[in-house]
Image (spheres, rainbow, N blue to C red):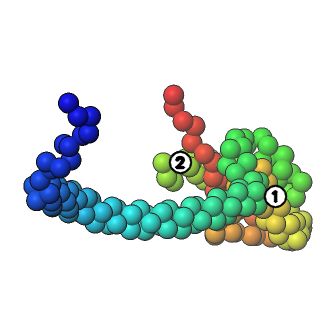
Amino acid sequence: MSKIDRSLEKINYIKLLIFLVIFIFVTLLLISLLIFPNIKKYRVARGEFNQARVHKIRVQSVLKEREKELKKLRLDNRKIFAAFKHNFTKEEFLAFAKKFFNKATLKNVKKSSYTKEYNVYELNVTSSLKTPVKFYQFLDALNHYNNIVQADFPIDLKSNGDIIYSSFKIKVYGLLKKKK
């Protein structure tokens, strides 16, 4: 027995070449059927993702701007928000009016629902004063009152020589109390 291996001499190179070509053909076929369509889908999905990301960045920047505006508005208008939350009382308003008028009376006209979130009280104010300057000072001071108060027309001013009698309506805006 000889120890030389002669198995390589019996290899049929044509069969080997045919199997290699078939293997390469099947591999290329699988690549073209399975991988290429997925590459196309991947490109489309990547494009959509990039568009969505750009849109998201734009929306986030707009959101940040709106949040800054909201914070600024809340800071600038905190007195108005506090005025809506402040409960209106006749006694408190009459004490405020006494600073400007000699005599002031307050009569409830009606209470109406302005919207779902706010109440509007209409009050008829009758007062007497010595000079109309006090009346205008009162109207100016309403801007700094604890509630949101609007003086309405008609404003009726009558004088008997010494004292000026005034009559006008005011509206007081306030938040509705939520029922639990």
Q: Position of residue 53 (x, y in %)?
A: 48, 63
At horizontal 10% and vertical 59% (from top left) the residue drawn is: 14
Q: Is residue 18 above or below residue 157?
A: above
Mark 2 surroundings: few (<14), some (14-19) or many (≥20) residues within 10 A: few
At horizontal 19% and vertical 59% (from top left) the residue drawn is: 24
Mark 1 surroundings: few (<14), some (14-19) or many (≥20) residues within 10 A: few
Number of the label disc, if any, that sits on residue 3? none
Q: Position of residue 109 (x, y in %)?
A: 58, 50
Separation (CA) of disc 1 from disc 2: 23 Å
* Left or right of 27 in this view: 124: right
- Amino acid at circle 1: His
Residue that carries the numbered disc 1 in the rendered image: 144
- Amino acid at circle 2: Glu
Query: Which element carries disc 1, helix, strand or loop?
Result: helix
Q: Residue furthest front?
A: 1
Please identify the quarter of the rendering in which residue 91 is found: top right
At horizontal 32% and vertical 66% (from top left) the residue drawn is: 44
Residue that carries the numbered disc 2 in the rendered image: 117
* Left or right of 8 in this view: 118: right
Q: Is residue 144 visible?
A: yes
